[in-house]
Image (cartoon, rainbow, N blue to C red):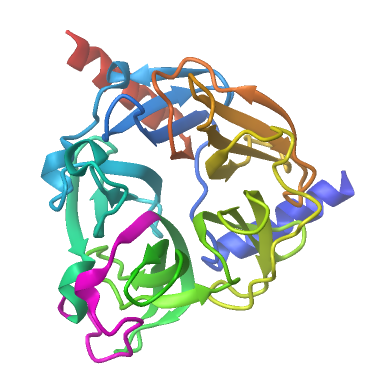
Amino acid sequence: MKSLFLSALLAAVVLSAGGQNVQKGSYGYLYCHMSDQGEWTAYAVSRDGYRYRDILGGRPVFDPQQHARIEGGTRDAYITRSSDGKGYLMVTTDMCVARSHKWDNYGIDLLRSKDLIHWSSVTFDFRRGDSIFCDPESPSPYRDWSTVNRVWAPQIFWDPAFTWPDGEKGGYMIYYSMLNRAEEQYDRMYYSHADRSFTRLTKPKLLFDWGYATIDADINFLPSDGLYHMLIKKEGGRPGIYTATSRHLTHGWSMPVEDDYVSFEGTKKCEGSSAFQLIGDSTWRVAYIQYSDRPKHYRICKADSRLRNFRDPVDIEGVTAPQHGSFMRLTKREYKRLLKWDRLQQR
């Protein structure tokens, strides 16, 4: 009981300082994900975090072509609350393999909403280079932006320590993997910062380089040890979903922990991890797509309060075509709003 109290106290201090994505809601969960039936974003809701109900039957919750202005597909949806807790933010990979017939893409989409239903957005086509960023004079990671091949799986983390040139504090760290085959040998993790309007983006900076390809990072702050923890898929070395830690959000990341990773699936291939906590629980759940199965399996496993000791994987229930996505806690009002929207659209 004492340890749980201390963890809760530390969490309250961190949240009050703004050093974490806002956590709000004790009624249920939203699973916001790419559909495996098509490259669109879908919703499902749950009361217990395991058994879900599709919203709109698993169909698109918005028109992907309206928001993905490069290729018309929104993949790898990541959703969270705005820093003031009054709105919602989403980032997606702007990519449509069904249209391009290749596993390359060129940008990301930043979306914002006040009700989880109506969304506005901006698209960043990285091939256009310095001009799309709000700090065009800052150093560039590439000599030639036109040869960018991938900008994959963006996610959001509120960074209260970031300072804008005018002195304003706070920004949304958007982190993603990127590849420019003409200038680098493998996918590496980069990050930018978006402003509070979620419409401006700083030029990418390298987050780390371990000497082999890495994709699908998922960062959380853990009150249990006061560290940032990152789940990430290693494409090089011994493949799998691993964890790394840092005392700092944008630098200082350790090498992956080699003796404690998502290995219980044997030789099956997994990616797209997303960690979340059940309401009132200090331990973690880690969801991921087991994509080498036919049919594919979207799994949820347990981890301890330090995001270690991965175990007991089970399939998610009730979701049509689950794929790479993310989880957000919901209030009762939000939960009921989505169910009402679902009923109205189904008529």
The magenta stretch spans residue 329: no
Q: Where on the picture, by quarter, is residue 147?
A: bottom left
Residue 86, image x and y in percent? 34, 50
Query: Which residues make up the magenta segment?
Result: 131-153
Q: Is residue 301 above or below residue 113?
A: above
Q: Position of residue 343 (x, y in %)?
A: 25, 13
Which residue does the image show at 30% across and 16% down from the upper left? 57
Q: Is residue 114 above or below residue 60?
A: below
Decide which of 343, 105 is in the foreground and name it.
Answer: 105
Give the side of residue 174 with respect to residue 281, left or right.
left
Can residue 200 be spotted in the picture? no
Asked whether residue 134 is drawn in magenta, I would say yes
Q: In this view, does 28 lie to the left or right of 103?
A: right
Q: Examine the rendering and report whether any part of residue 192 can be seen.
A: yes
| Residue situated in front as seen by the camera: 113 or 139 | 139
At which x and y percent is residue 270?
A: 57, 39
* Vertical comparison of 299 with 74: above or below: above
* Nearest to the observer: residue 202 or residue 6: 202
Which residue is the extreme one toward the top? 347
Q: Which residue is drawn at 67% across and 62% down?
A: 244
Q: In this view, does 142 lie above or below 29?
A: below
* Quarter of the image where the N terminus is located: top right
163 to the left or right of 300: left
Residue at image point 47% right, 70% down: 159
Q: Where does the image place residue 239, in percent across and percent down from the top left? A: 63, 50
